[in-house]
Amino acid sequence: MNSALLRLLQLCDPALPVGGFSHSAGLETYVQLGIVKDAATAKAFVTGMLSQNIHYTDAAIVSLVYDAIIANDINELKQLDDLCTAVKLPKEMRMASQKLGARLIKIFQPLCNNIWLSCYAAAVNAKELQGNYCIAFGIIAHALQILKTDALTGFYYNAAAGFVTNSVKLVPLSQQTGQELLFALQPLITGLVQKNVRANKDLLGVCCPGFDIRSMQHEQLYSRLYIS
């Protein structure tokens, strides 16, 4: 039995009580505008989010967090937290990252007993750092002795599962269609993980501005089911 696999499954479980189900990352705007309206457009949204947004932001940062810990570079970790906040232009996305990060830390800090996580949590509590979700995820995954490639795979899968679940609810799509969509995303996730193993810090934030615009518009929607 691979205990690291069990820890990864718990860390990436979409049902983990961090509140991820309440965030759509702008998908609700796309649906209300009629841009995402069926299985094909939902797949285009999720594919774009994974390959043109998360790939150059949160997933890359998870990889860089591993590198910083291996290099024993606490200053690099702090800079990554600042950069993560800076590349999230919509206010709701910054708040979502910080709320999810705080809840993830609260769950796993008693379980890990890890110096990096304890130092990060202390800096967040002291308002010295923001406590972004992907930073916390990277620290916790490393503390749980999960390989970087496995951690990135789980991170992408968790994001994809969240987007698909929200698409099923919002479009709406059938549960079967949702599972077919999630299954079809596997080759994309595998390819993105391989690219993120050696993440380029200079490319952080190189993402599609359309997602940021829709997230900003979400703040002004007449009716909303999701926080972001």
Image: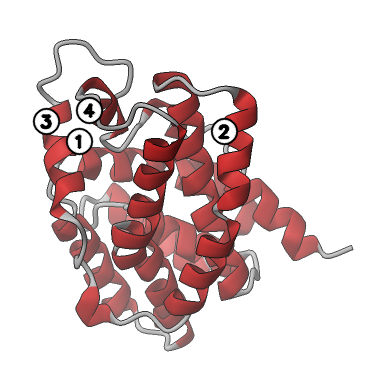
Q: Which residue is mark 3?
A: 217
Residue 163's place in the image compared with 141, above or below, is above
Q: Residues within 10 Å of mark 4 (few under 14, many from 20)?
A: many
Mark 3 or 1, nearer chain start? 1
Residue 95's place in the image compared with 38, above or below, is below
Tag 4: residue type? Thr
Front residue (pair 47, 129): 47
Would you say residue 11 is visible in this rendering?
yes
Q: Measured from the top left, where is residue 203 in percent x and y? A: 22, 76
Would you say residue 101 is visible in this rendering?
no
Residue 117's place in the image compared with 169, above or below, is below
Mark 1 or 2, nearer chain start? 1
**Are discs 3 and 2 less than 8 Å apart at CB?**
no
Residue at 14% across / 53% down in the picture? 209
Mark 2 or 4, nearer chain start? 4
Determine whether the residue tagged by mark 3 lies in a helix, strand or loop. Answer: helix
Whether residue 182 sits left or right of residue 117 in the image: it is right
Q: Which residue is mark 4?
A: 29
**Are discs 1 and 2 less than 8 Å apart at CB?**
no
- Measured in 3D between alpha carbons, the distance from the residue under mark 1 to the one under mark 4, in whole angstroms, is 13 Å
Determine whether the residue tagged by mark 4 lies in a helix, strand or loop. Answer: helix
- Measured in 3D between alpha carbons, the distance from the residue under mark 3 to the one under mark 2, in whole angstroms, is 26 Å
Tag 1: residue type? Glu
- Measured in 3D between alpha carbons, the distance from the residue under mark 2 to the one under mark 4, in whole angstroms, is 19 Å
**Are discs 1 and 4 less than 8 Å apart at CB?**
no
Q: Measured from the top left, where is residue 118 in percent x and y? A: 46, 60
Label drawn at residue 50 = none
Label drawn at residue 92 = 1
- Measured in 3D between alpha carbons, the distance from the residue under mark 1 to the one under mark 2, in whole angstroms, is 26 Å
Find the residue positioned furthest to the bottom.
71
Tag 3: residue type? Gln
Q: Residues within 10 Å of mark 3 (few under 14, many from 20)?
A: some
